[in-house]
């Protein structure tokens, strides 16, 4: 079958198919991986049937034969000499036909969910494809990656997500063009010392493994920009970790036994580090050495057991995003207003937070765009509530609010306000002064039908959820 779809959605579909994102808050995807080289595919070139594709073989660029219970692939596929993307996911393939050698323009192949495939044989076939750059082998129950993987020397992206790998072959490091390596959700306990030979590696995802330490050679990955070490058993980073001069993003969440004092001192020597995620680490206290990370732009400390925030965090004057959600925080440092570049602050689900005591430092965050104070036992929005001129997104849900002070309308840039799960029975008409307001969530509030009708008349262009 040949699918007729518009060009723009197809490009988006291709992007989604080729991308494997980090799936947690503060875990961005690789921008390079998202910039598909297949954007020139037109709406008439997308096929889901080999039989239909063979009717005009030179016009086929994208073929998706996923979920068709295939035990073998017809040798006729070799006639599709202009094929760029081939998806064979969720089949029962045992081997790949030698005729795949003819696909000289193939750049991407997906073989996810093919647990019976002879991967050594498959790699021997794929080695002859001169343009093959991206290979996906997720969910295949692979316990040992065949050494033949080294034969596909032009690979720039290899996805081995959700397998049973306990180690990696030394031959993997022969993939000198490799830029992105996805190893999430395996059983890796260590990496080969030769990992440092992957001189072009920019991204490595090791989330949800059993790694306790990184080899010394890891510091030789001079081009590494993104590293996901979440959900492992890391205790320390090697001292030479600070040699990763291009590292911009580091996810260390769910490593509860790591020594953070020493870690912060090492990370402070990374000149390009901009995003650090330390969520879900059962941290009870933050070392004052966090103040050394003065190049950070995003810091995620949510879902820990923090009771206080050290004043040294106020030295991170380049911070734009700070998440402190789901902790036990009572107050913020007096100098918190020094974070003048802060645009997004999440304090939600801190049930012991003394909101009335943080009003002053919040008021000094004049560039704040997004503020979350949900589930903080906030009961009153009075005249003292900070007037944040540029605020666009405000979350006050799951509190005990009975009403909203009219002064909130002074925040004229507001776009979306979440007031759900409160005790609100009336809102001030001054909200109509917020001319950019798009959405208000009022679900689970005791508003009368009359109040709803009145509110709808005031805010006719606003989407209101009751």
Image (cartoon, rainbow, N blue to C red):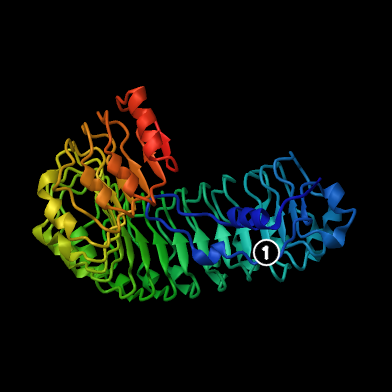
Disc 1 crowd, CA 10 A, few/some/many (<14, 14-19, 20+): some
- Write the residue at 24% across / 44% down: 373
- Say above or below: 319 vs 26: below
Residue 456 spot, x, y in % from top left: 40, 34
- Say above or below: 277 vs 462: below
- Quadrant showing the C terminus: top left
Residue 98 spot, x, y in % from top left: 80, 59
Quarter holding residue 369: bottom left
Quarter holding residue 171: bottom right
- Write the residue at 34% across / 49% down: 434
Q: Secondary structure at mark 1?
A: loop
Quarter holding residue 352: top left
- Write the residue at 57% across / 60% down: 158
Q: Nearer the viewer, residue 450 or 337?
A: 450
Residue 278 spot, x, y in % from top left: 29, 54
Residue 378 spot, x, y in % from top left: 18, 38
- Say above or below: 126 vs 376: below
């Amino acid at each position: 079958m040949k699918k007729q779809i518009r060009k723009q959605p197809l490009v988006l579909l291709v992007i989604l198919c080729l991308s494997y994102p980090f799936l947690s808050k503060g875990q961005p995807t690789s921008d390079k991986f998202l910039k598909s080289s297949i954007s020139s595919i037109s709406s008439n070139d997308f096929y889901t049937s080999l039989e239909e594709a063979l009717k005009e073989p030179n016009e086929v660029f994208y073929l998706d034969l996923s979920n068709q219970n295939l035990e073998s692939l017809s040798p006729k596929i070799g006639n599709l000499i202009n094929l760029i993307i081939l998806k064979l996911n969720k089949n029962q393939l045992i081997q790949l036909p030698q005729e795949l050698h003819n696909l000289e323009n193939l750049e991407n192949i997906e073989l996810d969910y093919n647990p019976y495939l002879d991967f050594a044989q498959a790699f021997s076939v794929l080695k002859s494809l001169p343009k093959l750059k991206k290979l996906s082998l997720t969910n295949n129950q692979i316990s040992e990656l065949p050494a033949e993987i080294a034969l596909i020397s032009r690979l720039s992206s290899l996805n081995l997500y959700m397998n049973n790998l306990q180690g990696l072959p030394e031959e993997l490091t022969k993939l000198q063009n490799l830029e992105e390596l996805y190893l999430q959700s395996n059983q890796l306990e260590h990496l080969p010392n030769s990992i440092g030979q992957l001189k072009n590696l920019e991204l490595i995802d090791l989330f949800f493994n059993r790694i306790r330490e990184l080899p010394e050679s890891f510091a030789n990955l001079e081009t590494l920009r993104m590293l996901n070490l979440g959900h492992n058993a890391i205790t320390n980073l090697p001292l030479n970790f600070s040699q990763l001069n291009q590292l911009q993003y580091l996810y260390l969440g769910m490593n509860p036994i790591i020594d953070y004092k020493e870690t912060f001192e090492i990370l402070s020597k990374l000149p390009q580090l901009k995003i650090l995620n330390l969520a879900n680490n059962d941290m009870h206290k933050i070392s004052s050495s966090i103040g050394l990370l003065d190049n950070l732009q995003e810091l995620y400390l949510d879902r820990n057991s923090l009771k206080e925030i050290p004043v040294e965090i106020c030295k991170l004057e380049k911070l734009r995003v700070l998440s402190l959600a789901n902790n036990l925080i009572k107050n913020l440092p007096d100098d918190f207003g020094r974070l003048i570049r802060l645009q997004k602050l999440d304090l939600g689900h801190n049930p012991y937070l003394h909101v009335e005591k943080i009003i002053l430092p919040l008021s000094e965050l004049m560039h704040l765009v997004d503020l979350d104070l949900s589930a903080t036992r906030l009961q009153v929005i009075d005249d003292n509530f900070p007037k944040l001129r540029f605020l666009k997104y405000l979350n006050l849900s799951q509190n005990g609010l009975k009403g909203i002070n009219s002064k909130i309308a002074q925040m004229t840039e507001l776009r979306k306000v979440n007031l759900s799960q409160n005790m609100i029975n009336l809102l001030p008409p001054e909200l109509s002064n917020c001319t950019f307001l798009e959405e208000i969530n009022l679900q689970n509030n005791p508003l009368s039908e009359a109040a709803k009708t009145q509110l709808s008349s005031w805010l006719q262009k606003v989407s209101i959820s009751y």
